[in-house]
């Protein structure tokens, strides 16, 4: 309801009041953000463990709950459903609420949903550790928790959808498109994949086809849109002028949506699926290049800096675009023959998800939290430390995994190289990757400490501005 | 208004409020009057790029689609494979038929040497290596009575059964296959038998009773 | 984009299109039937025996697919066939009777599609048990799949024989649990030697071209158990491309 003053005042309290989301909405957002940050640290720890196990297989090998197959699944599930699920939803809800200009509705639903989402995820992770994983990439959670997650998600998303449908102005901004798309597409994607893979499984190779469709769909239709919603919003608000090339933004959006779901076949290149499936996916990866170009053109103001969030987002945009180009290049069959099944594939995934989407989300988080709690972040040093360590960590991780994968790929395709020799070739690169994971974990711990310190300061330090 | 300089990482000041954000971008998308005919290249360039991407994707897809055939795994394959018409090796089939229990192997043995005094050998047999009109007839109608093979005489106490309509009732393909197998096994070097030939002979001798050695030897 | 309902329809249409692509592949491959071979009078692939199906569940819950693939690429695209991981490319028909297809997405470990059909020597149950118990190279030890227990009465028939580094304390034996037995049964059922017409069988390698044993030879092979190559070439005149 408040019209923001033309010149933002130094304190977040006056300018962006909590009136936009009310106390219940505030609580919902903070629960989601807090859980997200905690899951980020947990996922970072699990990823560190699985990274160590890659070069030192004896590490925790006697522990059945942390055998590599399970620790890797745990890390991935915690990261995607814990970190992205919570934080992405929070950012989407916050942005939609702000753009709607009204307090978030259905906040109690959101709180309930957030709690059950995290409960379901916890049960699911325990299930994976106990031996119930589905061994499907990005869908490893045991099937008995997935309907719970779906219901919890719907409860949380309700607030966002009502903020969109109830918006005062009819016109939609780019963040609207991306956030609403993510809110709707995830349940559709998730439920269809559940049914086709877990409840009434399709036969044979179709399982791999549907699993590939789901994994790519989750990235292009959920994770990327959530991050882009945050990025567009923050960059536009901070830049203080219309995004350059905004007239093409809509085309970039629809390009992602129309084409993103077709890229699933890129995991089946050379595999036991008909050739057309991977061919179509490769074609789609090239059409998707247009989307990346549009995003870079629109968000290039972030490269000029202007604040910590802009720095995070600029890193994220650059990594996101680079990841897209790399996807197209490694989609070419002549390149895929070397990068498939190697650490290079993992490097690409980390570049896109850690480097691209996560950094953009960090930018949105650093922008949003002061406005939700009504006070700045507790420690500037921790913020800068987070940025530096994250950037370093991601660069190191991608470089080391990429080098390891490239070496591995060439060696795999040379029949004269005995398979047992390949581990020796990649050993030192994998050590570097572990070091990178440690840096990222430290960075995430900085974030978590800063986050909860800020909350404590806000709760203790005084009044939170918030109308009833 | 320009972007504020945010030196303090603990809080980023924004230049736009929410309403301004939406307003400005809505205005940006509205058609504007353009008195000086300013021409923005960017949309054209983007269109060009998009078209290029789509063109590449389309050409790639068409070239490597494998005709969208679910049996084509190699994207370089140009022609659709008629996987239904897989040719079966007649000799391999014939071997399997020969070894069917109580068909051929039981009497003539897997070595093709038969049993002395009872079942004639097939290895080096002049009947097997001779004109195929003879052995086709033997299979179609059977053989009775004494017969001499490779100088050894067999009294003919047991009768070779018919594999034609009055006996096992094998098809032309099966008779041709088993004969082709026998004619190249155990050192035999006779040309394979054609199913069409079997069909033709079947027409001629369909209901003949079991042949005797003399009758067979009269066939050229 | 001003109108909410149109936007929603656009979302649904965009999603629906890629889902339609999935359903198209379901239409093509959903009812893929086994291939009947006239000469052998049998259809391929074979269904998995019960304990192998249980073993696939163990494989799945331990997350073996995160290091091992089960897909052989065609000769000429990578060195899978040259490494002896398979005689031919894997095709969709190989997987129709597998309840949980474990294609895998990483080759930290070797490909397992044709583990039980590898030439010149496939690993046997004993060597696989040993491998699981002590690990090797990049593969961790899965000793929790085994029980180190006191010998009571007669030694178990399943106990791992002690050789080399694998020596239990005197009076004790190392016995595989049910899960280990199932897992090994599953691994020994991985055999895809039948040549489907669509798989373009590789011509048998001539003298001098020996495929390298996939593990670099450290898994001690046992002589092939005399299982002759059952698949007779199905193609007639050898002009098939």
Image (cartoon, rainbow, N blue to C red):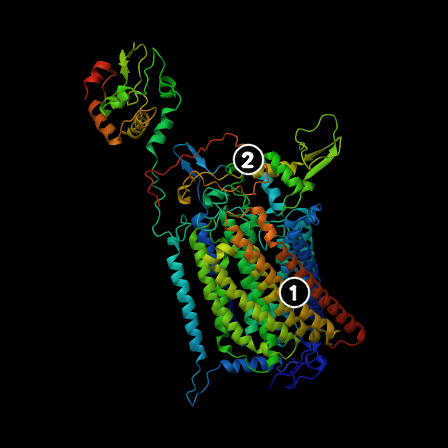
Above/below status of A16 relative to A421: below
- In this view, the residue in front, A68 or C204, is C204
Secondary structure beneath dot 1 equals helix
Chain for disc number 2? C
Callout 2 environment at 10 Å: few (<14), some (14 to 19), or many (20+)?
few
Residue A138 horizontal/vertical position (percent): 59, 55
Query: Which of the 4 quarters of the picture holds residue A433?
Result: bottom right
Residue at the far bottom in the pictured view? B35
- In this view, the residue in front, A210 or A108, is A210
Chain for disc number 1? A
Callout 1 environment at 10 Å: few (<14), some (14 to 19), or many (20+)?
many
Q: Is residue A404 shown to the viewer in this render?
A: yes
Residue A111 horizontal/vertical position (percent): 69, 64
Secondary structure beneath dot 2 equals loop
Q: Is residue C15 shown to the viewer in this render?
A: no
Horizontally, residue C171 falls left or right of residue B162, namely: right
The residue that appears at 71% across and 79% down in the rendered structure is: B8
How far, Cα to Cα, is label 1 from label 2?
Answer: 47 Å
Residue under pointer 1: A393
Foreground disc of the pair 1, 2 = 1
Tally of numbered discs: 2
Residue B184 horizontal/vertical position (percent): 31, 27
- In this view, the residue in front, A144 or A410, is A410
Horizontally, residue C232 falls left or right of residue A339, namely: left
Q: Which mark is residue C49?
A: 2
């Amino acid at each position: 309801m408040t019209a923001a003053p033309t010149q933002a005042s130094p304190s977040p309290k006056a300018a962006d009041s909590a009136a936009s989301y009310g106390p219940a909405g505030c609580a919902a957002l903070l629960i989601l953000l807090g859980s997200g940050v905690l899951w980020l640290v947990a996922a970072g720890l699990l990823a560190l463990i699985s990274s160590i196990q890659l070069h030192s297989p004896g590490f925790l090998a006697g522990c059945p709950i942390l055998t590599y197959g399970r620790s890797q699944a745990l890390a991935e599930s915690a990261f995607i459903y814990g970190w992205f699920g919570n934080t992405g939803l929070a950012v989407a809800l916050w942005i939609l609420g702000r753009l709607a200009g009204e307090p978030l509705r259905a906040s109690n639903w959101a709180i309930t949903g957030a709690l059950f989402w995290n409960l379901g995820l916890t049960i699911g992770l325990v299930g994976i550790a106990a031996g119930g994983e589905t061994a499907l990439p990005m869908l490893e959670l045991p099937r008995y928790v997935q309907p719970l997650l779906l219901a919890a998600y719907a409860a949380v998303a309700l607030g966002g959808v009502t903020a969109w449908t109830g918006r005062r102005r009819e016109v939609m901004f780019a963040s609207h498109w991306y956030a609403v798309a993510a809110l709707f597409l995830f349940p559709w994607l998730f439920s269809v994949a559940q049914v086709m893979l877990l409840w009434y499984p399709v036969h044979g190779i179709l399982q791999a086809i549907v699993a590939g469709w789901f994994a790519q769909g989750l990235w292009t239709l959920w994770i990327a849109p959530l991050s882009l919603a945050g990025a567009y919003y923050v960059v536009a608000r901070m830049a203080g002028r219309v995004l350059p090339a905004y007239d093409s933004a809509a085309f970039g959006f629809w390009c992602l949506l129309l084409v993103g779901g077709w890229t699933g076949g890129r995991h089946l290149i050379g595999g036991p699926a008909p050739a057309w499936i991977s061919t179509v996916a490769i074609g789609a990866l090239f059409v998707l290049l247009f989307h990346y170009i549009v995003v870079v053109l629109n968000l290039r103001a972030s490269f000029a800096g202007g604040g910590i969030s802009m720095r995070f987002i600029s890193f994220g945009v650059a990594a996101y675009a680079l990841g897209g180009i790399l996807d197209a290049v490694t989609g070419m069959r002549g390149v895929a023959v070397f990068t498939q099944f190697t650490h290079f594939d993992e490097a690409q995934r980390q570049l896109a998800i850690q480097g691209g989407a996560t950094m953009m989300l960090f930018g949105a988080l650093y922008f949003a939290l002061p406005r939700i709690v009504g006070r700045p972040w507790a420690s500037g040093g921790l913020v800068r430390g987070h940025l530096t360590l994250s950037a370093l960590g991601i660069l190191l991780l991608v470089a080391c995994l990429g080098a390891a994968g490239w070496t591995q790929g060439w060696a795999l395709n040379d029949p004269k190289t005995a398979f047992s020799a390949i581990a020796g070739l990649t050993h030192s690169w994998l050590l570097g990757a572990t070091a990178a994971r440690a840096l990222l974990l430290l960075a995430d711990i900085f974030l978590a400490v800063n986050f909860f310190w800020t909350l404590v300061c806000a709760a203790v330090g005084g009044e939170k501005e918030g109308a009833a | 208004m320009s972007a504020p300089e945010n030196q303090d990482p603990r809080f980023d000041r924004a230049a736009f409020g929410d309403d301004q954000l939406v307003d400005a971008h809505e205005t940006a998308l509205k058609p504007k009057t353009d008195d000086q005919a300013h021409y923005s290249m960017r949309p054209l360039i983007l269109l060009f790029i998009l078209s290029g991407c789509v063109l590449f994707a389309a050409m790639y897809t068409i070239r490597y689609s494998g005709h969208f055939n679910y049996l084509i795994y190699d994207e370089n394959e140009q022609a659709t494979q008629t996987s239904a018409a897989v040719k079966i090796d007649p000799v391999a089939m014939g071997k399997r038929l020969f070894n069917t229990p109580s068909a051929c192997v039981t009497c003539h043995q897997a070595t093709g040497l038969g049993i002395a005094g009872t079942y004639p050998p097939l290895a080096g047999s002049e009947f097997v290596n001779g004109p195929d009109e003879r052995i086709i007839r033997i299979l179609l109608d059977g053989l009775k009575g004494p017969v001499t093979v490779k100088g050894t005489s067999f009294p003919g106490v047991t009768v070779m059964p018919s594999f034609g309509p009055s006996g096992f009732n094998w098809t032309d393909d099966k008779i041709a296959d088993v004969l082709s197998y026998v004619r190249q096994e155990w050192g035999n070097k006779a040309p394979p038998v054609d199913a069409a030939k079997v069909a033709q002979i079947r027409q001629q001798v369909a209901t003949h009773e079991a042949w005797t050695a003399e009758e067979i030897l009269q066939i050229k | 984009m001003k109108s909410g309902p149109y936007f929603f329809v656009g979302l649904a249409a965009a999603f629906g299109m890629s889902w339609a692509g999935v359903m198209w592949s379901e239409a093509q491959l959903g009812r893929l039937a086994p291939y009947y071979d006239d000469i052998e009078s049998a259809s391929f692939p074979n269904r998995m025996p019960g304990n192998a199906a249980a073993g696939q569940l163990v494989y799945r819950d331990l997350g073996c697919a995160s290091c091992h693939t089960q897909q052989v690429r065609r000769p000429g695209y990578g060195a899978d066939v040259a490494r002896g991981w398979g005689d031919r490319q894997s095709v969709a028909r190989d997987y129709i009777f597998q309840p949980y297809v474990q294609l895998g997405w990483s080759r930290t470990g070797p490909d397992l599609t044709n583990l039980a059909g590898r030439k010149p020597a496939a690993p046997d149950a004993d060597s696989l048990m040993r491998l699981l118990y002590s690990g090797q190279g990049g593969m961790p030890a899965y000793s929790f799949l085994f029980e180190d227990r006191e010998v009571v009465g007669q030694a178990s028939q399943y106990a791992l024989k002690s050789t080399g580094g694998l020596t239990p304390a005197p009076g004790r034996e190392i016995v595989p649990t049910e899960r280990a037995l199932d897992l090994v049964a599953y691994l020994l059922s991985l055999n895809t030697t039948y040549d489907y017409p669509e798989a373009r069988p590789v011509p048998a390698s001539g003298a001098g071209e020996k495929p390298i044993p996939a593990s670099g030879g450290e898994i001690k092979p046992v002589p092939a158990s005399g299982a002759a190559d059952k698949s007779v070439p199905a193609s007639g005149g050898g002009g098939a491309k």
